[in-house]
Image: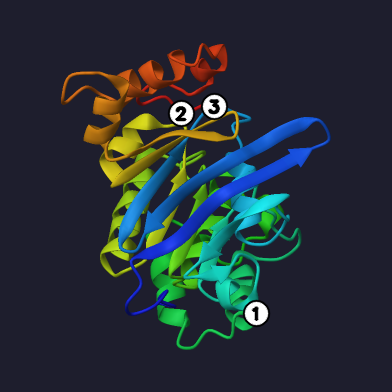
Amino acid sequence: MVKISPTATVALKCADAHKRYGDRTVLADASFTCPVGAVTALIGPNGAGKSTFFRASVGLINLDSGRITVGGHEAGTPQAQRSTSLMPEQPDLYPGVSVWEHIVFVALLYRLECWRPAAEELLERFGLADRRDTLSHELSQGMRRRLALVMALLRGAGMLLLDEPFNGLDPRNSAELRTLVRELAADGAGVLVATHILSDVVRLADRVVVLERGRVIAQGTLDELCREAGLPAGADLESSYLALTDSLGDSAAGAVSGVGETS
């Protein structure tokens, strides 16, 4: 694994991130941190700014103001990119290129060493071992997402960004992903997962960040979100989320699915 730093406690820090497209603000002075060795979930309705944040975190777009750093290095710089891996919400695969050739491309691009055993294990874990010679355009949507996951996980990056990784995964592969993410965090990685599936947040995340209209309106452990929402200890995440967003009078909050829903 490309670890952040032997002494670092924060894998990713977002400080007053602001981004506009024309007259539309998609990130509004958003601030939060992702600790080393922990899974942080980023939740919010469609259009809250989650995917924009991910793109800014790897240098694909520039912020208008504010900073995102990975291991203390400015997002998008070579130092930050060496320890950051992103699975985007809509993975771009190369048509006419096989599953295995995609894996080889990642290994060569990042000059990975001794990568074949890890690649074989990941393909097996996500049900792609018998599809290694299949061309990407011949894969189902779910298989395409699984391949994108394998490509993101192969690097063993110290900061892993997963944008809606559970979309298109069946229950077995979802469980496999949760297990693998927990293993990576236990090994010292920072993991940030954006998802609409609140049941996966409950089972996976150490911390939750609630993003609404580009603003961070709450963050903390599940118990801390309960208290901030003014609910009794042990209230479920859906209740906490709805209480937090309803207090803003934002009807768009309902775009986040209920526990166990997949879209």
Residue 257 image-quadrant placement: top left
**Residue at horizontal 62 percent and vertical 61 percent from the top:** 58
Identify whether 253 is placed above or below 19.
Answer: above
**Residue at horizontal 58 percent and vertical 78 percent from the top:** 79
Cα distance between the residues tagged 3 and 2: 14 Å
Near mark 2 (Cα within 10 A), the count class, few <14, some 14-19 or many ≥20, is some
Circle 1 residue? 109
Near mark 1 (Cα within 10 A), the count class, few <14, some 14-19 or many ≥20, is few
Closer to us: mark 3 or mark 2? 3
Q: Residue furthest right?
A: 22
Circle 3 residue? 45
Q: Residue furthest left?
A: 233
Cα distance between the residues tagged 2 and 1: 33 Å
Q: Is residue 58 left or right of residue 37?
A: right
Are the residues flagged by discs 3 and 1 in contact, CB closer than 8 Å? no
Closer to us: mark 3 or mark 1? 3
Q: Residue 262 has which mark?
A: 2
Circle nearer the N terminus (3, 2) = 3
Near mark 3 (Cα within 10 A), the count class, few <14, some 14-19 or many ≥20, is many
**Where does the image place residue 221, in percent across and percent down from the top left?**
27, 40
Q: Which of the two residues, 250 or 95, is positioned nearer the viewer here? A: 250
Q: Secondary structure at mark 1?
A: helix
**Where does the image place residue 255, in percent across and percent down from the top left?**
53, 20
Q: Three-letter amino acid code at disc 2?
A: Thr
Circle nearer the N terminus (3, 1) = 3
Q: Three-letter amino acid code at disc 1?
A: Leu
Q: Residue 100 has which mark?
A: none
**Where does the image place residue 179, in percent across and percent down from the top left?**
29, 54
Q: From this viewpoint, is residue 189 visible?
A: yes
Q: Is residue 262 left or right of residue 227?
A: right
Are the residues flagged by discs 3 and 2 in contact, CB closer than 8 Å? no
